[in-house]
Image (spheres, coloured by chain):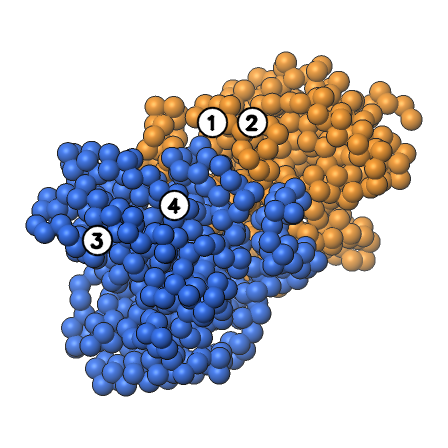
Chain colours: A orange, B blue
Amino acid sequence: MNTSQLQALNASQAAALLTRRELKSEDLVRACLERITEREGDIHAFAQLDPDAALSTARALDAGPVRGLLHGLPMGIKDLFDTADFDTTYGSSVYAGYRPRTDASPVALCREAGAVVLGKTVSTEFAYFTPGPTRNPHNTAHTPGGSSSGSAAAVADHMLPLALGTQTAGSIIRPAAYCGVVGFKPSLGRVSSGGVKSLSPTMDIVGGFGRSVRDVGLLGAVLTGDTRLSGWSALSASDSPRIGFFQTPSWPQADTDVQRAWEQATRVLSAQAKDCQDVITPENFADLIQLQKDVMTFEMARALSHERIHHRVRLSTPLNSLLDDGMAMTGASHAANLSTVADWRQRIDALFENHDVLLTPSTTGIAPEGTATGDPLFCRSWSILGLPSVHLPFTTGKNGLPVGLQLVGRFGQDHHLLAAAHWVHEHLKG
Amino acid sequence: MNTSQLQALNASQAAALLTRRELKSEDLVRACLERITEREGDIHAFAQLDPDAALSTARALDAGPVRGLLHGLPMGIKDLFDTADFDTTYGSSVYAGYRPRTDASPVALCREAGAVVLGKTVSTEFAYFTPGPTRNPHNTAHTPGGSSSGSAAAVADHMLPLALGTQTAGSIIRPAAYCGVVGFKPSLGRVSSGGVKSLSPTMDIVGGFGRSVRDVGLLGAVLTGDTRLSGWSALSASDSPRIGFFQTPSWPQADTDVQRAWEQATRVLSAQAKDCQDVITPENFADLIQLQKDVMTFEMARALSHERIHHRVRLSTPLNSLLDDGMAMTGASHAANLSTVADWRQRIDALFENHDVLLTPSTTGIAPEGTATGDPLFCRSWSILGLPSVHLPFTTGKNGLPVGLQLVGRFGQDHHLLAAAHWVHEHLKG
């Protein structure tokens, strides 16, 4: 086959070809590496790359049996995951040159399923707000978002078909939105986070990026061990999902680009889906934003204790400020917050009696100009609630930058969410 | 003061003296080191020791300001926690000679509060069932229990006043019971586990061992950031806790030693506490045992993916068998189990409408003879429910080995649990 545009294949398209041995992993890896060579000087998606090791792994996979769902697929790993064959910095100079002994669990699972790790992608400093060097591939004057900056940018720019990320506030959905790719955050607790730098265990979740819903379904199936995430069939018109339209109390922060995307999406879906309704906002739903912030602040200050105590001068001012704030909070308030979170996680389930999925904004607008990674406002509630969500890119806003919306699913029903997301995405892309 | 028996001081007694500068940390550390020299050849509590570093740290603390609640207290750290100045093996030859870059969060927090880390204590292999070399200090022909074997044995044997442990099934409460010390497992989610080897994030929790309830309260206050855990006042007769007696559906597995301890405790408490009632067993409570096993098996197989894939020959047969079982389980069943767990955590709260704390067995009996670490049967339910619990030693059984019972508290009410546990313990010790 023509190998000049292999890097543009979606992960699921490539996986099908690789599994049927109609595409060599080596050729796909080579195409991605060429794209990286061409573009990395502008995008800075990678913290580290190992082309030779990737090609060697690809050749071994080409010569052996099909290993699993990700057989032969090039992948990027956010530099928040431990890797035994790449340095792991967590986006901080504190860990310059640090080489862990062991692959983080999600990395080991992806490799077991046949993935070829090309390199580590740039994370913001400890996945908080201080940005790395990555630029938005659609316009390098704009941020790719954070904290999974490099993963989102690399997938958007066809450097890689698939990449791992993590979300605590909005670190998958936001960069997916800014870079115009599909981002998937599974239900809390479904993916082992062993060997992933711990920030806020109440919310930290591993997920990733692809260029279609089927792409992230492949990745999700490997991460969760649930084959239903890649095994769903496309829904027909007669079994279209029941969609709840949920602007949320943060809606006034959505700019005109998001408003236009919303109008377009709700118009199309209302015409095509058999059941679309506005969501009745649960009482005190707006409180979830502050709750998310408080839990994250408290937990990050403890999780990063060693760095806080021994490396303060090497941490950014915003991070030190967060850690100070967190240490000033009492464990009594944290305990009360954990109880509130548990109550909310039960309460929110009622929303899914009337809706299979919720359509809601991903971001306040397009990727902002500059390096600041943007506002996770529209992601915080879904992070603290632990619900699965998917970002779907489908239009553009100011400066031609990508805009899309988020679909949120019921806890543990990640496969239903993905099937619905595929249906919605097909209709929104037109 | 007479320094010949300093190692016999409880942590809370020593902390009071250290804070008032009536005791030097160096003297206390030296007394512990002498005890270790005398006994370690029989007990094998330590994976690694650094006497010189400990003495140097102690001298620095003696010369400086009081640092915090654990100022000058010698501590042991279960070898499941990363430490930047000790090798960290997780109880496995896979990690022989491994030196992490960073202290695990709980270790950093303890040191920040003034603790002097004497060494790493023996853990079973990845905190599962394959034992290390540690023996029960009361009778070296018997197990100390697991997985926090070395921490429990060292505290019991007056080698250390305080030590860190972790529990996923019964790894704090069981060794505390077998060794006759106080073990404390805080509410799930209250203690950061960053840098602690991840096994089953749904249940993994950091806690520890002391020789009194006030000891573990000091440690708990530091770990949770909640000063109420060390700040409670002893309860008077008029505000005795409402105690629910809960044999649980596993009661037929309790042997005559536990039955005798139960009869003694319920007789004493019924006479002294103003409100003692038998707990009405929640419907399907017995299902929690299998639920705990299933979640742990699924999650450990993923968490230990790197070891499972790359180091199978260096893992024990029981561990490989567990990992195989876990990989054979579906992610779909795990998702369903997580939902069941969430429901249970809400449902169980109703028990605490009528009882402040629950009295329940810790183990099926005394520490078994041999090296097998015993059965966590009576701990599994409380682990999957994420409730705080304390083991209280108060009598002896066969061969003079320790026996006690467990007190379980309401989620997030760790300080109330500890105050109640102190009251109960005082009455049971007679």
Q: Residue at image x 38%, y 23%?
A: A314
Which amino acid, mark 2?
Answer: Asp
Q: Nearer the viewer, residue B1 or A273?
A: B1
Q: Is residue A235 left or right of residue B46?
A: right
- Image coordinates for residue A82, horizontal then vertical, percent: 56, 35
- Image marks 2 and 3: residues in contact by CB distance under 8 Å: no
Give the labeled residue for mark 3. B7
| Secondary structure of residue under mark 3 | helix
The 10 Å Cα crowd at callout 1, few under 14, some 14 to 19, many 20 or more, is some
Give the labeled residue for mark 4. B120
Q: Nearer the viewer, residue A63 or B137?
A: B137
Which label sits on residue A95?
Answer: 1
Which amino acid, mark 1?
Answer: Tyr
Q: CA distance from mark 2 to mark 3?
A: 43 Å
Q: Residue at image x 52%, y 52%?
A: B125
Q: Is residue B178 left or right of residue B60?
A: right
- Image coordinates for residue B52, horizontal then vertical, percent: 28, 35
